[in-house]
Structure formats: structure tokens, C-alpha cells
Image: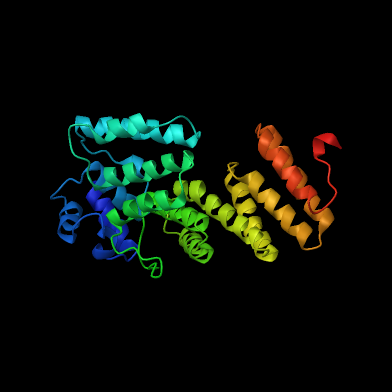
Amino acid sequence: MPQYSVGQAIKCTRERKDISQAILCDGICSIATLSKIENGQRNPSANVMEALLERLGLPIGLYNVPVTEVRFQRAVLEQKITHILAGLGKDISALLNEYANLPEPMDKFEQQFHLQMTGIQNYLKHSAPEEILPYYIQALKITFPEYDLEKLPKEKYFTSFELIILNNIALEEHRLGKKDEAEKILLFLKEYYESGKIDDASMEKEYPIVLANLSNWMEATGRFEEEYEISKAGLEFCIRRGKLSVLEVMAFNIGYSLIQLGRKDEGIKYIDQAFSLMELKGQKERLQKGIEYVQKIIPYTAPSHK
């Protein structure tokens, strides 16, 4: 069986997908550097390798490259920070300071990570969106310097991390009242995920969140038919892939939109399913708020009380 270097894998996949070197490496490295990587004349750093592989939709865990001790320490800190934030946990300021103050200067990808996580940390501290948004935009512009909300390029390839930053930009734009701008970003992300450019693991993790945000915004503006279609697509995707992270959100939004569209009995079935999932997940506060939200439009009793 032939053995491939990471450079060969990048080159073969890039050519098979008909992606130019300029498009692939934009914001990551120079075309000359990419050529040397593809031809085995240069070993990429771990961060450059991961970014190139992500844009190609390739799994990053199949390749190993040497890393410095400091880079390894930062990788460990990245895992700790991500794990804490995933659980909406404690303050990570000390970890972020440790990350930034290690002996070696941060490379562009480490700077991007630090800015993104600082933005999330500030969000969890309930900072104003105008204070948070600059962190996300600055982070994105490290690898996408030409970022312009009015000119999101369909031909560009993004890393998973860049797409997450774009989603966070949309959330903050929405909090600032710029709803059209926020929706434009999410519709762009929806189309990008559906284009097949992203790897399966990232697709399964991030695509449902984009759909959940979109369906929530459709509901907020009374666009219940659109909310129903997006939520239904999201629910079917989650069930098909066995992903439960936002399953209750999709079920609730389907039910709520159906009720608003005059299909009350069908809608209540989905609402009941959503509340049962919330109860199983121990989401007591969310469950109570959901019940009160539904009771504003119809008489309703939750499944466990029927």
C-alpha cells in the first residue's frame, strides 16, 4: 500500500477538488510555501497543516508533525479552555494569560484562537456586543484579511475555526440589532456547510447550530413557514447523524411554528417531544421558560403533568 506524506495528501485532494493553490492557502501561508509542502521540500507547522487540511475537508488526526514544547503546552491549554467553555464553566482569564505569555510568541493561528476565546469569555461575562464583536472580527481577519460582510466569497474555502468565528460574528451583529447582516452570514454558512466542503465531524458539530440560530431568528420575525422548513431539516439531520445537542431546539421550533401556522395538534406533539428531551437533559429552567412561552399562545400542559 502506498504511503503518502501530508504534502502529497494535500496536493492530491486539492487537485481532485479542483482548488487552486491561491484559494487554498489564502491567509494561511504563501503559494511558494504551499508548493514546497506539497512537493515534500518543507514540513508544515502543526497549525498550518491543520488549517490546510480543514479547508480541504480532511481529518486532521491522521497526520503527525513535530511540535515544540511550547506549542505542545499551548495545545494542552487549548483543550482545557475549550472544555471549560463548552460547559459554560468558570472564568478562563488565567488560562488565556498563561497561553499568551508562554516563552515563544503566538503564531497567527494561536493569536486567532486567543482572540476568539477572549470574545467568548467576555460574552459569558455579559459584556456588551460592541465590546465583543471586535475580538471576533480581528480573529477572522488574521486568516481572512479581506473579510467584508457585503462580499462573502462563495469560492473561498474556510477552516472549521473560521466558520465558527463567522457564526459568532453573526450572533453579535444580531445582538446589536443588525438582523439583516446577521441573517446574511448565517444563510452564507448554511449554504457553505451544505456545499460538501467541510469534513463530516465539523459538519455534524456546527451545521445544526447554524440551523438552530436561523430558525430562532425566523421565529422572532414571524416567518413561521421558513422556521418550520429550517427546523425540520435540522431535526432530520440530527436524527440521521445521531446528534442530540440541539435536538430539543429543533423539535420545539417545529412545534411552535406548526401551532402558529394553524396545525395545533401536530405542533403539540413536537412540543411535547422537545420538553421531554429537556427534562431528560435536566434543563429545568429552559423547560419552564419553554412552557411559559407556549402558554402565551395556547392553553398547554407539559407531558409530565398531563
Give the number of marks.
Answer: 0
Q: Residue at x 69, y 65 (%)?
A: 225
Residue 55 position in % (x across, y down) = 34, 55
**Is 86 located above or below residue 222 in the figure?**
above
Task: Give the camera-side residue of 244 and 296.
Answer: 296
User: With 73 as the anchor, is 135 left or right in this view?
Assistant: right
Quadrant that contains the N terminus: top left
Quadrant that contains the C terminus: top right
Residue 161 position in % (x across, y down) = 38, 49
- Identify the residue at the far left of this view: 41
User: With 121 as the anchor, is 298 left or right in this view?
Assistant: right
Q: Residue at x 66, y 59 (%)?
A: 219
Taking the image as drawn, is residue 56 in sight? no
Residue 180 position in % (x across, y down) = 52, 66
Task: Give the camera-side residue of 117 and 7.
Answer: 117
Taking the image as drawn, is residue 20 in sight? yes
**Is 199 located above or below residue 16 in the figure?**
above
